[in-house]
Amino acid sequence: MKYATLILAASFILLSCNDRKAVETLEKATMDLHDEAMKSMGAMNAVASDIRAALPGVDSLSPRYDSLQTAVRTIKKAEADMMDWMQQYNSPAEDMPIEAATSYLTDQKAKMAKNLKDIQAALAQGHGALGK
């Protein structure tokens, strides 16, 4: 009986460590997406700057002007979404239950994946509006 209790306790500790490792892996994947989004955001903001420089030379009644303005709005929204995510994100506390941490990080990873996709789409839209 004594050995069964010891084995059960050891199994629980090992499973707990594996669960914590899974949380750490999920958090790393989320932050990797964040890092990739930040790199893309730098390029996106450079395109936004090019668009702002080009706007004064474009007829405000032309379709190209509308295209450039739409691209700027899309870029601003993608940037604002990233800033909002960064303000609300908190790394799960060590004492947070595994299920709660996993659920939270799964949600955060999905949000960051969408934000990365939006940033990349805004970058492509900006390039398209500039004719690049």
Image: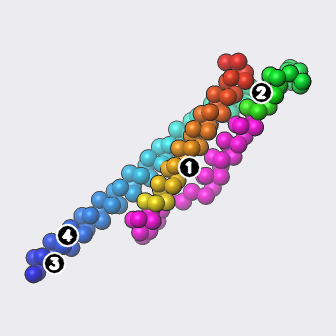
Vertical placement of residue 119 versus 62, above or below: below
Tell whether position 105 is magenta.
no
Name the spot of residue 86 as percent of width and height, x first: 60, 52
Using residue 92 as the reference point, say whether residue 125 is left or right of it.
Answer: right
> Residues at badges 3 and 2 in contact (C-beta under 8 Å)?
no
Please state, as top left, top right, bottom left or bottom right, where the N terminus lies in the image.
bottom left
> Residues at badges 4 and 3 in contact (C-beta under 8 Å)?
no
Quarter occupied by residue 67: top right
The numbered disc on residue 67 is: 2
Task: Kindly identify the amino acid type of the residue bearing the numbered disc 2.
Answer: Ser
Q: Nearer the viewer, mark 3 or mark 2?
A: 2
Magenta region: 72-101
How many C-alpha atoms fall within 10 Å of the one at disc 3: few (<14), some, or many (≥20)? few
Instruction: Calculate the distance from the C-alpha at mark 3 to the C-alpha at mark 2.
Output: 69 Å
Q: What is the chief secondary structure element of the magenta stretch?
A: helix
Name the spot of residue 132 as percent of width and height, x first: 67, 18
Instruction: Calculate the distance from the C-alpha at mark 3 to the C-alpha at mark 1.
Output: 42 Å
Sequence-wise, which precedes: disc 2 or disc 1?
2
Front-lying residue, 36 or 69: 69
- Which residue is identified by label 1? 111
Vertical placement of residue 6 versus 87, above or below: below
Sequence-wise, which precedes: disc 2 or disc 4?
4
- Which residue is identified by label 4? 10
Snapshot colouring? rainbow
Task: Kindly identify the amino acid type of the residue bearing the numbered disc 3.
Answer: Thr
Task: Kindly identify the amino acid type of the residue bearing the numbered disc 1.
Answer: Lys
Q: What SS does tag 3 mark?
A: helix
The numbered disc on residue 5 is: 3
Name the spot of residue 2 as percent of width and height, x first: 11, 81
Vertical placement of residue 115 versus 24, above or below: above
Sequence-wise, which precedes: disc 1 or disc 4?
4
